Image (cartoon, rainbow, N blue to C red):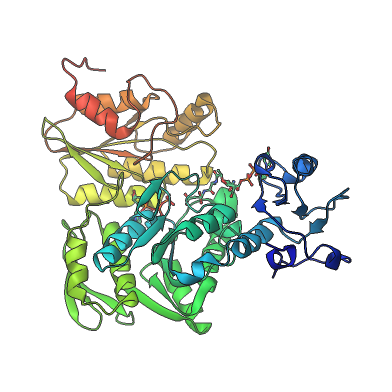
Amino acid sequence: MKLDQLLQDVPFQYEDMHKFNDIDIHGLTDSSNEVEPGCLFVAISGYQFDGHTYIQDAIKKGAAVIVGDQEYQSSGVPYIQVPNSRQALGILAHNYYHDPASSKIMVGITGTNGKTTTSYLMKHILEDMGYSCSLLGTIQNVINGQYSKTVNTTPNALTLNQLIDKSRDEVVIMEASSHGLAEYRLEGLHFDLCLFTNLTHEHLDYHGTIDQYYEVKKALFHKLKSNGTAVINSDDVYGEKLAEELRQEGRQTYTVGRSATNNLQILEQLSVDPPSVKIKGHDIHTLESPMAGLHNLYNTLQAYAAATQLDGKTTTDIFDSIRNFPGVPGRFTTYPLKNGSTVVIDYAHTADAVFNCLQTVHDAAAKKITHIFGFRGNRDLTKRQEMMNISAEMSDQYFLTMDDLNGVSEDDILQSLTFYRSQTKIGKGEIIPDRTLAIKKAINNSEPGEWIVITGKGHEQYKQQFSLPTHSDESTVDYVNNMKNVELN
Ligand SMILES: CC(=O)N[C@H]1[C@@H](OP(=O)(O)OP(=O)(O)OC[C@H]2O[C@@H](n3ccc(=O)[nH]c3=O)[C@H](O)[C@@H]2O)O[C@H](CO)[C@@H](O)[C@@H]1O[C@H](C)C(=O)N[C@@H](C)C(=O)N[C@H](CCC(=O)O)C(=O)O
Ligand SMILES: Nc1ncnc2c1ncn2[C@@H]1O[C@H](COP(=O)(O)OP(=O)(O)OP(=O)(O)O)[C@@H](O)[C@H]1O
């Protein structure tokens, strides 16, 4: 691709640019480790490394052009200074792959909680409707029916465009994380549908305030195509605000919620377990969530609403499809134990998610609730006390344990667990640092009718070694439940 084509819409000033417009560019990367002769290297000042310090290395490896956002005196190859390298990478990736999303039905899902669940359910419904779907998100990417691992919930701009380019599917359903939006990973993409699930306390270490966090999330909705629709949970305070602001901007909105002003109104809750509601859109229907919990009912409503916005197929097809949804790995996954107690494994790592999870167990008439959880290292510290309080109030006992350390020492996390526990009025918890031993103790001491709720890791594999030879909460539960002659801990 010629350099001038690649640079289309990238903001920059370069006096003698005409001399270089005809350079053929044979690749695009922001990693000096992936530079090939003839490629364009984008230098990004990151959180760990500064790509500008690798420019010489990139030139040595044959980079033909460099783009960066710092002052830099380049020798030999053109250095194009842009206002923001991450944004430039987004535009360049979009150009390099010839706007791959333009031939797709694009669905973007944002919100603090519920993105993965809603995206899985949407994929399930749309596939039943006859669409082929790609899925990009936290658990995995699925492109042309092929599964691959993910590094980020929202991949970087280059990977994202690469994946969409590779997709032969009609629809791309993707989770839009606030980090992804803030870091311009979605630059140049336009969406047919954007969904907003909710906004609660999370990632304030990164965004500063909840209002700044909201503004970042809102940016997704400015990527709607002119005929695109925003599907919003208006029972969430920030959802209501978003719907109002988008309407004022003249954008098409479709809201879901309890008030009569919504496009899809929840008329009445018919049952809590399983969650079902009477809803009113064009007609009145009963919608039953295939997953436990009021929070999952909202995810189901959002996916249902979004699916009806895409296609004229009968709603009956969609209800059938929803009924057959198998659920999402690590999202309120239940394991009945031999002794009549039940384990729940859930990815909750915000106070709101922990609340929803424990409330769901209360609604299932648990005789006793044991909650096992910890704090992820190197993530928002300000949510910890609230998580702690909710656990102490809603469980009969809690075991505080290790979650991912993310570079923080185990001692630091232990201090934090001890501190937050000491700040909590209700003292019915203990600290068991080894996650597998915490699970073992809870299971070995459990009674029929008890629910053991293990939150934080969900579908994920452990990142550190624990005492039991297991690699995830699920495998620990399975191991302990099937152990013979387990000694009590
Ligand atoms: C804090 C953060 O957002 N980090 C993200 C960011 O990395 P970064 O800016 O720190 O990159 P860096 O490693 O410092 O490198 C800077 C530049 O130098 C280059 N470099 C580096 C080394 C070298 O030898 N040569 C070289 O050229 C790198 O290729 C890069 O271009 O940009 C990378 C590419 O987009 C992301 O993969 C990375 O996500 C890290 C892994 C991460 O943990 N991010 C989390 C916070 C995140 O984004 N989470 C959200 C989900 C949140 C949620 O909803 O729960 C997500 O979307 O995943
Ligand atoms: N609509 C919802 N409202 C509140 N909590 C929810 C909702 N949906 C899911 N949760 C809780 O959040 C956890 C994570 O759910 P899910 O993976 O669907 O969300 P996510 O937005 O993709 O999360 P993340 O950004 O952390 O990957 C669930 O395990 C559950 O505890």
Looking at the rendering, in which quadrant would you find the N terminus? Answer: bottom right
Q: Residue at 46% x, 34% y: name it.
A: 404
Tell me which corner region of the image, top left, top right, bottom left or bottom right, holds residue 418.
top left
| Quadrant in the rendering for residue 119 | bottom left
Q: Residue at x 52, y 42 (%)?
A: 379
Q: Position of residue 410 (x, y in %)?
A: 50, 25
Given residues 422 and 251, the one toward you in this image is 251
Foreground residue among 317 and 343 = 317
Percent x, y for residue 45?
Answer: 71, 48
Relative to 431, residue 347 above or below? below
Res 64 seen here: yes
- Residue 419 location in percent, x, y? 48, 32
| Apparent side of residue 442 relative to residue 218 in the rendered image (left or right) | left
Looking at the image, which residue is at 88% across and 65% down?
Answer: 16
Residue 139 in sight: no
Q: Residue, x 42% and y 30% (percent of image)?
A: 402
**Left or right for 33, reference 237:** right
Q: Is residue 286 above or below residue 389?
A: below
Instruction: Determine the quadrant in which ligand 1 lies.
Output: top right
Residue 17 x/y as whole percent: 84, 65
Viewer-nearest residue: 197 or 202: 197
- In terms of depth relative to the viewer, which is nearer, 351 or 159? 159
- Residue 42, compared with residue 191, is above or below; it is above
**Position of the C terminus by quadrant:** top left
Q: Is residue 284 left or right of residue 66?
A: left
